[in-house]
Image (cartoon, rainbow, N blue to C red):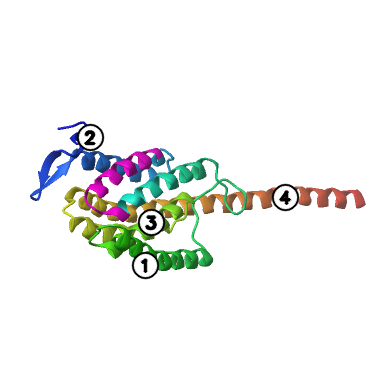
C-alpha cells in the first residue's frame, strides 16, 4: 500500500461497509468545528478548512464531485468567514454580531439557491460521471448559502444547515458513507442547538443594549434636573 492509499484504508467496518481513516479524521474535526461555531469561537474556521480538504478527497473517491468541489468553496469561504469574525463589521459599523436575516436577504438567499441549483446540476451531469447530479447539486448550493450566512453571523444560517444536513443524511447513506451520514444526522441536531444558542446570545445582547440606552437616558436627565433646580433657586 502506498502512502497516498494509506488514508483510504479501512479503519473499521460499519453496517457492512468500510470506514476509512480519512472519514474518521474528517468526522472528528467536523464535530469540533460545529461545537466552536455554536460558541461563536473563531477557532472553528481553521478546523473547517482542514475538515473540508479531507472531505474533498473522500467525496471525490465516492464520485460525489459536486460535494468534493464544494469543499474547496468551503475552504475559501472559511478563510473569508474567519476574517469576518475577527475583523468584520455590521451594517451599523460596529463589530460583527449575531443578527437576523432581513427580508431582502431572505429573498436573495432563496433566489440564489433556486437559480444555482439547476445550473450546478447540469454542470455535474454533463462534466462528471456522477449518478446523482441534481441531488448532489442541491446539497452543494444549500451548503454554500449556509456558509455565507454563517460567515456573517446571521441567525438563520442554522435553519439552512438544518435543511441541508437532513437532506445530506440520505445522500451519503446512498453512497454507503455511513459514518458521514451519521455525522450529518448529528449536524442536524446540532443545528437546532446552535440556533437556540445563537438566539439566546442575540437576546442577551439586545437586552444589554436596551439597559445601556436606559442608563444613558437616565444620566442625561439627571444633569438637566439639577440645572433646573439651580435656575429655580437663583430666581428666588
How far is disc 4 from disc 1 in space, using C-alphas? 58 Å
CB under 8 Å between discs 1 and 2: no
Secondary structure of the residue carrying tag 4 is helix
Pinpoint residue 85: horizontal percent, then vertical percent: 49, 44
How far is disc 2 from disc 4 in space, using C-alphas? 69 Å
Which label sits in the foreground, 4 or 3?
A: 3
CB under 8 Å between discs 4 and 3: no
Magenta stretch: dominant secondary structure: helix
Name the residue that disc number 3 marks. 158
Secondary structure of the residue carrying tag 1 is helix
Which label sits in the foreground, 1 or 3?
A: 1
Disc 1 crowd, CA 10 A, few/some/many (<14, 14-19, 20+): some
How far is disc 1 from disc 3 in space, using C-alphas? 23 Å
Q: Earlier in the sequence, mark 2 or mark 4?
A: 2
Secondary structure of the residue carrying tag 3 is helix
> Split into 4 quadrants, where in the image is the N terminus?
top left
**Is 116 above or below relative to 87?**
below
Q: Earlier in the sequence, mark 3 or mark 2?
A: 2
**Is 69 above or below relative to 123?**
above
Q: Which mark is residue 82?
A: none
Q: Which mark is residue 220?
A: 4
Q: Earlier in the sequence, mark 4 or mark 3?
A: 3
Q: Which mark is residue 4?
A: 2
Q: Earlier in the sequence, mark 4 or mark 1?
A: 1
Which label sits in the foreground, 3 or 2?
A: 2
Look at the image and give the residue range highlighted in magenta: 46-66
Inspect the magenta stretch and tell me whether residue 62 lies in it: yes
Pinpoint residue 55: horizontal percent, then vertical percent: 28, 45
Amino acid at each position: 500500500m502506498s502512502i497516498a492509499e494509506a488514508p483510504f484504508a479501512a479503519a473499521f467496518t460499519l453496517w457492512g461497509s468500510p470506514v476509512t481513516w480519512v472519514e474518521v479524521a474528517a468526522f472528528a474535526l467536523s464535530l469540533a468545528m460545529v461545537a466552536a461555531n455554536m460558541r461563536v469561537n473563531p477557532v472553528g474556521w481553521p478546523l473547517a478548512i482542514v475538515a473540508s480538504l479531507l472531505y474533498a478527497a473522500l467525496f471525490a473517491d465516492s464520485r460525489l464531485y459536486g460535494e468534493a468541489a464544494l469543499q474547496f468553496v468551503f475552504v475559501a469561504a472559511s478563510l473569508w468567514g474567519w476574517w469576518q469574525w475577527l475583523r468584520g463589521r455590521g451594517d451599523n459599523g460596529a463589530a460583527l454580531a449575531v443578527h437576523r436575516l432581513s427580508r431582502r436577504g431572505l429573498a436573495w438567499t432563496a433566489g440564489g439557491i433556486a437559480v444555482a441549483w439547476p445550473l450546478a446540476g447540469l454542470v455535474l451531469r454533463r462534466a462528471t460521471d456522477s449518478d446523482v447530479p441534481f441531488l448532489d447539486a442541491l446539497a452543494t448550493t444549500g451548503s454554500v448559502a449556509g456558509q455565507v450566512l454563517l460567515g456573517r453571523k446571521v441567525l438563520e444560517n442554522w435553519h439552512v444547515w438544518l435543511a441541508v444536513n437532513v437532506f445530506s443524511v440520505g445522500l451519503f447513506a446512498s453512497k454507503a458513507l455511513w459514518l458521514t451520514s451519521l455525522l450529518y444526522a448529528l449536524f442536524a441536531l446540532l443545528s437546532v442547538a446552535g440556533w437556540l444558542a445563537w438566539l439566546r446570545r442575540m437576546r442577551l445582547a439586545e437586552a444589554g443594549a436596551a439597559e445601556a440606552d436606559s442608563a444613558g437616558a437616565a444620566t442625561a436627565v439627571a444633569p438637566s434636573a439639577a440645572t433646573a433646580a439651580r435656575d429655580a433657586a437663583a430666581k428666588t
